[in-house]
Image (tube, rainbow, N blue to C red):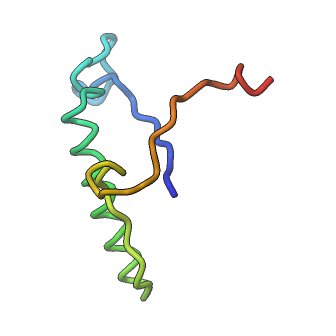
Amino acid sequence: PHFHAQICRRALVEGEFSPRKDREIASKPELIKTRHMWANVVNKHLALVGHEVRIDARSNEDRGSLFLATHHEGWHAQR
């Protein structure tokens, strides 16, 4: 299982979105950091409601999964 998330690439500056995109927000290190923060929040709430299942922020490759990542084709490929 996986999920898709959207992030805003415009930083908040004095309570307003910047007119410029922050390229660093979508970098690989930031993606990994965001995955781990998301896993921590989700796992905390799963534990609070008594579920034993947990999510793992690591990639399939890092977890040694046999599932291979697929190439995203976009909506137009499904027409």
| Image location of residue 14, percent across then percent down | 22, 27
Closest to the observer, 14 or 49: 49
Residue at the extreme front of the image, as rendered? 66
Q: Residue at x 28, y 38 (%)?
A: 31
Q: Quadrant of residue 22?
A: top left
Q: Residue at x 71, y 22 (%)?
A: 77
Q: Is residue 16 left or right of residue 33?
A: right
Q: Residue at x 25, y 27 (%)?
A: 27
Q: Is residue 48 left or right of residue 12?
A: right
| Image location of residue 56, percent across then percent down | 33, 62
Count of marks overlaid on the render: 0
Residue at the extreme bottom of the image, as rendered? 50
Closest to the observer, 53 or 16: 53
Closest to the observer, 30 or 18: 30
| Image location of residue 74, percent across then percent down | 62, 24
5 over 56 or under it: above or below: above
Q: Which residue is drawn at 27% across and 64% down?
A: 40
Q: Is residue 49 left or right of residue 32?
A: right
Q: Quadrant of residue 79?
A: top right
Closest to the observer, 75 or 65: 65
Q: Quadrant of residue 20?
A: top left
| Image location of residue 28, percent across then percent down | 24, 31
